[in-house]
C-alpha cells in the first residue's frame, strides 16, 4: 500500500495498533503504521488472552496461529499456610463460547502473530518513526513525524488512530486527560518455579502478610509472579529471588526452588480513562484511552477490542458504505465499556491484594463455606468468569442498537428478546460457534468471519405468512433480499437461514440454529461485523429502513455532511 497515500495513520504497533491496521487493511483501506520504538518489544508484558478476545482473533483469522503457542488455563486456586483453600473451575454455562478458557501467551508472541497477519495485507511497520505533533482539521489531520535519522516529516492524513500507549502523544496533543486514581505498587517477576503447581491454573498465595499471584507461561515451570506488597529490590534480581522463595514456600508449606528473574518490573496500579475517545478525525484506543489494574488481565484485551470496534466502522465510512454518523457509535460504546472495566478491575485488585487485617480469617472461613456448598461455589465461578472473559459485554444503549420493530428510532432501548433469542445489542454466540447444545454453529461461524455486516433472514415456507410477510412467502422474500443484495452487497452479506443448502444459505436442517437464535419465520437479524446484534425485525419491507437506521448507504448514494 506504500505506492498510494494512506487513508489512515495508525500510531503504535503494539497489539492495539496492529489490530486496527489489520482490520482496516483487510477491508481494503490504505494504512500507514508507525512506532517510535526501534523494533518489536522483547519483554513478555501481558499474558492473558480471554475468551472474547479469542473470538475476535478467530474472526480476524489470526487465532489458529496463536492457539498452539499458548497455555490454556481453566482454574483459579487459592493457598495459605500449606493448605489448598479452594480451587475454582471455569463456568461458562450462561456465556457459550468455543473458547471456555484463558490462553496464557507472551504478549510478544501475540504481537508477532498479528504482525505476520498484518503484513499479509500489505502493511509494513515503520520502526523508529515518532509522532511528535498533531493538528486536527475539519477534513484531515496534519502530523509531524521524526524519523530515526533525525529527519522531520510533515504530512497530512485523512484519519488518525492513536494506539500509542499510556503516555500517548496523540492524547496529549488533543488535550485529553486520563481521569481516575493510582493506588498500590506491585512487582512483576518472570521466574522458574520448582513448586509442583497445576499449570492449568492461576494461583493466589496468601503470604501472611500480603499475596502473590502466580500465572503460568506456556513454557513448563515458568511463571509470572505478582507481588502485591514488596516492591523493593527490582534492581537486585538475587534479592527478589530469595524473597519470593521464602514467600512461596511459606504459603505452600514446603521448600520451593525459585530461579533468578528473567524480567522484573515495578508498576503503579492505575484506574484511569478519558471521557471521550474521538476528537473529529482522531481516535484513541487501548492504553492511550484507559489504563487498568493488571489483576484480571484486561489491558491488552480491552485495547484489542477497542481497535476491532473502531476499524470496521472507520472502514465502512472511508469506503462510502456508511454515513459518517456511524463513527459516533465508537465513543458511545467504548467509553461506557471502559468505565465498566475500571469497576471490575478495581474489585479484582482488592480481591487479589487482600490488604485488610481481617482478610486471612475471612479467606479461610469463606473458602470453607464454598467447599461445603458446591452450588454456591458454582455461582461464584460464574460471576468470576463474567468479570473478566469479555463475553458478557453488550451495547444496549448504542446508537446502533435498534428497538425491535422500530428501526426509525435507533438506540437507547436495547430492543426486546424473542423466545429463546438474543436482544439487539447482545453478542451473537455464533460469532465464535460455541460447541454443545446440539447446535451446528459452523456455517454461521464461517459467515460471521466475513468482514461485512450480515443480514440473516428466516423466510416463511409454504403458505406461512404473518405480519409484514408477503403472501408469496419465500419467493417474495427472496426477491426483496436479492434487491437488498444489489443495493447494499458491498457492505452487507445477505443470507437465508433455511433447511436446505446452496448459494446464500446458512443451512439449518433441523431448525436448532433458528430456535437457539430465537428467529421465527418471516423475521431477520442484522448482525454487525464484530458479531453483535444491531436489530431483529419482521418482514422484508423493514429491511431497507433498518439498514438506513444503522447509517448504511446503498451503492451510489453519497453520505450527507456530518
Image: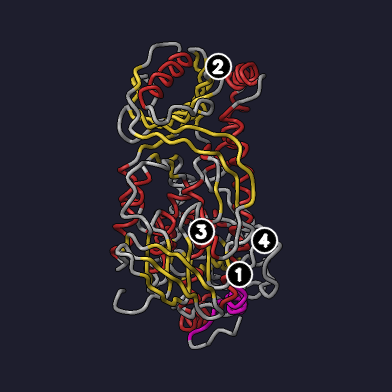
Work out whether residue 496 can be spotted: no
Q: Which residue is mark 2?
A: 208
Residue 379 falls in image quadrant:
top right
Residue 362 on image: x %, y %? 65, 19
Q: Is residue 412 above or below residue 101?
A: below
- Tell me the element at label 3: loop
N-term mark: 1 or 4: 1
Q: Give the CA distance from mark 1 to mark 3.
A: 15 Å
Give the residues in magenta.
541-555
Q: Residue at point 43% right, 19% down? A: 243
Residue 448 on image: x %, y %: 44, 62
Quadrant hosting residue 508: bottom left
Residue 328: assigned label:
1
Which residue is at the front of the view, 14 or 421? 14
Pinpoint residue 487: horizontal percent, then vertical percent.
49, 83
Residue to which mark 3 is pinned? 285
- Which comes sooner in the sequence, label 2 or label 4? 2
Direction from residue 125 to residue 232 in the image, left or right: right
Residue 256 shows in this picture: yes
Amino acid at each position: 500500500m506504500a505506492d498510494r497515500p494512506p487513508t489512515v495513520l495508525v500510531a503504535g504497533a503494539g497489539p492495539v495498533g496492529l489490530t486496527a491496521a489489520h482490520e482496516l487493511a483487510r477491508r481494503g483501506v490504505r494504512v500507514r503504521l508507525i512506532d517510535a520504538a526501534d523494533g518489536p518489544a522483547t519483554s513478555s508484558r501481558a499474558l492473558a488472552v480471554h475468551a472474547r478476545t479469542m473470538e475476535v482473533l478467530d474472526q480476524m483469522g489470526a487465532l489458529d496461529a496463536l492457539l498452539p503457542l499458548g497455555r490454556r488455563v481453566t482454574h483459579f486456586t487459592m493457598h495459605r499456610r500449606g493448605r489448598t483453600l479452594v480451587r475454582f473451575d471455569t463456568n461458562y454455562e450462561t456465556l457459550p463460547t468455543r473458547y471456555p478458557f484463558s490462553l496464557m501467551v507472551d504478549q510478544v508472541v501475540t504481537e508477532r502473530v498479528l504482525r505476520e497477519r498484518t503484513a499479509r495485507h500489505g502493511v509494513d511497520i515503520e520502526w523508529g518513526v515518532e509522532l511528535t505533533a498533531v493538528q486536527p482539521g475539519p477534513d484531515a489531520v496534519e502530523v509531524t513525524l521524526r524519523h530515526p535519522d533525525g529527519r522531520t516529516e510533515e504530512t497530512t492524513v485523512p484519519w488518525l488512530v492513536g494506539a500509542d500507549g499510556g503516555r500517548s502523544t496523540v492524547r496529549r496533543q488533543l488535550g485529553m486527560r486520563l481521569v481516575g486514581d493510582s493506588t498500590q505498587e506491585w512487582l512483576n517477576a518472570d521466574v522458574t518455579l520448582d513448586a509442583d503447581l497445576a499449570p492449568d491454573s492461576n494461583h493466589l498465595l496468601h503470604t501472611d502478610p500480603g499475596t502473590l499471584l502466580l500465572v503460568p507461561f506456556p513454557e513448563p515451570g515458568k511463571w509470572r509472579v505478582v507481588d502485591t506488597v514488596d516492591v523493593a529490590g527490582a534492581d537486585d534480581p538475587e534479592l527478589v529471588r530469595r524473597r519470593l522463595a521464602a514467600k512461596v514456600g511459606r504459603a505452600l508449606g514446603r521448600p520451593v526452588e525459585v530461579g533468578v528473574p528473567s524480567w522484573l518490573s515495578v508498576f503503579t496500579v492505575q484506574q484511569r480513562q478519558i471521557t471521550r475517545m474521538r476528537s473529529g478525525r482522531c481516535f484513541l484506543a487501548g492504553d492511550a484511552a484507559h489504563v487498568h489494574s493488571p489483576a484480571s488481565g484486561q489491558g491488552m484485551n480491552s485495547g484489542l477490542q477497542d481497535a476491532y470496534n473502531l476499524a470496521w466502522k472507520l472502514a465502512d465510512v472511508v469506503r462510502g458504505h456508511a454515513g459518517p454518523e456511524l463513527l459516533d457509535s465508537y465513543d458511545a460504546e467504548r467509553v461506557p465499556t471502559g468505565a465498566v472495566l475500571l469497576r471490575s478491575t478495581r474489585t479484582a485488585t482488592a480481591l487479589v491484594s487482600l490488604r485488610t487485617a481481617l482478610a486471612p480469617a475471612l479467606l479461610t472461613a469463606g473458602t470453607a463455606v464454598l467447599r461445603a456448598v458446591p452450588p454456591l461455589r458454582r455461582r461464584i465461578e460464574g460471576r468470576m468468569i463474567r468479570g473478566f472473559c469479555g463475553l458478557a459485554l453488550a451495547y444496549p444503549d448504542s446508537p446502533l442498537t435498534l428497538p425491535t420493530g422500530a428501526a426509525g428510532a435507533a438506540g437507547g432501548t436495547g430492543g426486546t428478546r424473542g423466545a429463546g433469542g438474543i436482544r439487539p445489542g447482545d453478542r451473537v454466540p455464533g460469532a465464535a460457534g460455541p460447541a454443545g447444545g446440539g447446535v451446528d454453529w459452523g456455517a454461521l461461524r464461517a459467515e460471521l468471519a466475513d468482514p461485512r455486516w450480515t443480514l440473516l433472514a428466516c423466510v416463511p415456507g409454504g403458505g406461512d405468512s404473518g405480519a409484514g410477510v408477503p403472501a408469496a412467502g419465500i419467493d417474495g422474500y427472496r426477491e426483496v433480499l436479492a434487491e437488498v443484495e444489489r443495493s447494499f452487497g458491498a457492505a452487507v452479506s445477505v443470507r437465508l437461514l433455511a433447511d436446505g443448502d446452496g448459494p446464500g444459505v446458512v443451512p439449518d436442517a433441523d431448525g436448532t440454529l433458528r430456535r437457539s437464535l430465537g428467529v421465527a419465520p418471516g423475521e431477520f437479524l442484522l448482525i454487525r461485523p464484530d458479531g453483535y446484534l444491531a436489530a431483529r425485525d419482521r418482514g422484508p419491507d423493514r429491511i431497507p429502513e433498518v439498514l438506513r437506521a444503522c447509517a448504511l448507504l446503498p451503492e451510489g448514494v453519497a453520505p450527507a455532511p456530518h
